[in-house]
Image: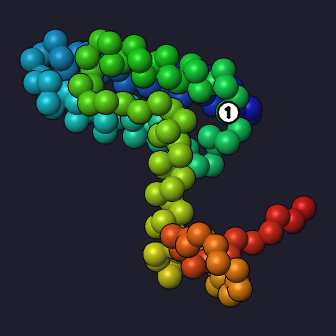
Amino acid sequence: MTAADHVSKLLATCARRILCVRVLRQHGLSSTSMNDVFRATVLAKLQYCASAWSDFCLVVDRQRLDTFLGQCKRRRYSYDDIPEVAEMFKNTDAALFSRSIRNDKHVLQHYLSERYKIQYNLRPRLHSKQLISKST
């Protein structure tokens, strides 16, 4: 399964969820509640495990996701400012990394060793971990 296949299935699932939101709107759901439902169903689906598959997306796939979110915003399913997909993926990655740094019992914690002391006067980091080098 390629990233394009995953994005296609993801967009199909989100389109079905938008149909449910549209039915709720027709039954008189307030705009505040509709925004909450949109964030809980559609945006949560887009962000779920995004750290695992977002790096494999091509520019075309990200444009498809951005187009879908733009259509949702134009149809007023969400009145919040929805960030672009690239920004959303970057925020998701940053949130995962910060959670893994703060939690000593996190499953990814053993991949991060303590940072070694550098004698140079460099810009300070937000964390004190050393990333492991890539291996084949």
Instruction: Choose between 36 and 91: the one closer to the eye.
Output: 91
Q: Quadrant of residue 76?
A: top left
Left or right of residue 99, residue 25 in this image = left
Instruction: Choose between 92 and 53: the one closer to the eye.
Output: 92
Q: Quadrant of the N terminus?
A: top right
Instruction: Choose between 62 and 44: the one closer to the eye.
Output: 62
Q: Residue at x 19, y 20 (%)?
A: 24
Q: Quadrant of the C terminus?
A: bottom right
Q: Quadrant of residue 109?
A: bottom right
Q: Amino acid at mark 1?
A: Cys
Residue 42 in picture, x, y percent from top left = 38, 31
> Which residue is the site of mark 1?
57
Residue 75 in picture, x, y percent from top left = 29, 12
> Badge 1 local density, few (<14 within 10 Å), some, or many (20+)?
some
Q: Residue at x 59, y 69 (%)?
A: 123
From this view, report whether residue 91 is shown above or below residue 35. below
Q: Is residue 133 visible?
A: yes
Left or right of residue 47, residue 1 in this image = right
Residue 101 in picture, x, y percent from top left = 52, 73
Furthest-right residue in this view: 136
Q: Residue at x 66, y 82 (%)?
A: 115
Q: Is residue 5 visible?
A: no
Mark 1 lies on a secondary structure that is loop
Furthest-front residue in this view: 121
Q: Residue at x 22, y 35 (%)?
A: 36
Left or right of residue 76, residue 87 in this image = right
Left or right of residue 31, residue 87 in this image = right
From this view, report whether residue 94 is shown above or below residue 122. above
Residue 118 in picture, x, y percent from top left = 70, 83
Q: How is the image coloured?
A: rainbow
Q: Say how many tags the image has.
A: 1
